[in-house]
Amino acid sequence: MDVLLANPRGFCAGVKRAILIVENALKIYKRTIYVKHELVHNQYVIKKLRKKGVIFVEKISDIPDNSIVVFSAHGVSKKTKEKAIKKKLIILNATCPLVTKVHKEVSKASEKSIETILIGHKGHPEVIGTLGQYNNENSKIHLIESIEDINKLPIKKNNTKLNFFTQTTLSIKYTQSIIKSLKKKFPYISGPKKEDICYATTNRQNAVVKLSNITDMILVIGSKNSSNSNRLAELGRETGVFTKQIESFSDIKEKWIKNIKYIGITAGASAPEFLVKQVVEYLQKMGAKKPKEMLGTKEKIIFNIPRYLTLPSHLKNYE
Ligand code: SF4
């Protein structure tokens, strides 16, 4: 069995930044760090941080006054931020800068009373945070998840003050088809030149398509609540290649790989590389050859953390 590793795969710049913010905050403040929602959607990352003393909460009201709170990479609504300020919490913002960019644009649309459509998944924390940037009594933001939702929108066809934004981790192909239908229905709608789907989502989806051309099975490493991992698994299935999404090597069933000659591996933007290594080791135990890394887009993007959270040198080797 040949093993091919997708490139790029795994951690994106936003996830790396969020984890670094929390790890450095633990070392600098030496106090309990509360995180609003899961910092990133991966159970191994969350477990590791929990062991270091991080407490994950869903509600700001669950955090004692004057504590330290980190907003997760998915971002929060304006109301959540206001609640944190009211409780005199020290806020460390780990929202991915690419999500913040969408927040700012939605907030601007709200100020200008531009009716807004957000394409995204209902209930996803990023979507809740983005919807929560819009606060205008005379105008509205609407969430749509599919082409079918477009016809249910209570918006006039010839509305000239209308725009759209998207969640950052959607399927490129499906989102483009939604946008096409939106533009057909609302000829005056404006929006970003490209959808707001981020570089990491785009590159990982393109890599899965490449993988699907040369493999007869794809393993996607990523938690069930990870939107971008779910999209990778969906895409793998759409290409017609037998695809399975796993949390770790222990989910792999021997019967899946019985007659497989070329197996591809990828990992969602919140899945750490050690999980990929474990899968490779497991497959090698089952007789696979040494893995080959596919050629792919080089990602050079780095998102800096706030200067006050960079570590003084005496703390850098502290574990
Ligand atoms: Fe940011 Fe994209 Fe990573 Fe989400 S997947 S944290 S938007 S870079």
Image: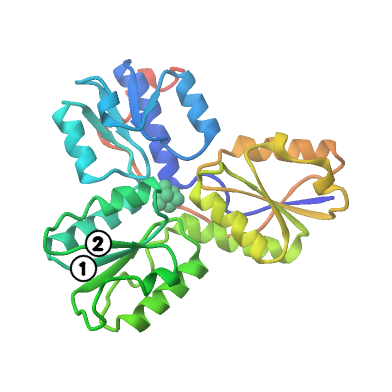
Q: In which quarter of the image is residue 23?
A: top left
The residue positioned 83% from the left and 35% from the top of the image is 285
Q: Rounded to the nearest whole Å, what is the CA distance between mark 1 and mark 2?
A: 6 Å
Work out whether residue 37 or residue 27 is closer to the camera in this orientation and state it: 37
Q: Does the residue labelled 2 lie within 8 Å of ligand 1?
A: no
Left or right of 77? Residue 212 is right
Colour scheme shown: rainbow
Earlier sequence position, callout 1 versus callout 2: 1
Residue 88 image point, x, y percent? 16, 26
Instruction: Tell me, for residue 291, which label it has, or none.
Output: none
Q: On screen, 311 above or below 77?
A: above
Q: Quadrant of residue 119?
A: bottom left
Q: On screen, 256 above or below 295?
A: above
Q: Residues within 10 Å of mark 2 (few under 14, many from 20)?
A: many
Judged from the image, the secondary structure of the residue bearing numbered disc 1 is: strand
Identify which amino acid the numbered label 2 is placed on: Ile
Q: Is mark 1 within 8 Å of ligand 1?
A: no
Identify which amino acid the numbered label 1 is placed on: Glu
Q: On screen, 76 above or below 264?
A: above
Residue 24 image point, x, y percent? 36, 26
Residues at marks 1 and 2 touching, judged by CB atoms closer than 8 Å: yes
Left or right of 269? Residue 123 is left
Left or right of 210? Residue 200 is left
Work out whether residue 138 or residue 97 is closer to the camera in this orientation and state it: 138
Q: Is residue 21 visible?
A: yes
Question: In this figure, which residue is indicated by the disc labeled 1?
Answer: 115
Instruction: Tell me, for residue 141, which label it has, or none.
Output: 2
Residue 5 image point, x, y percent? 68, 51
Residue 203 image point, x, y percent? 52, 59
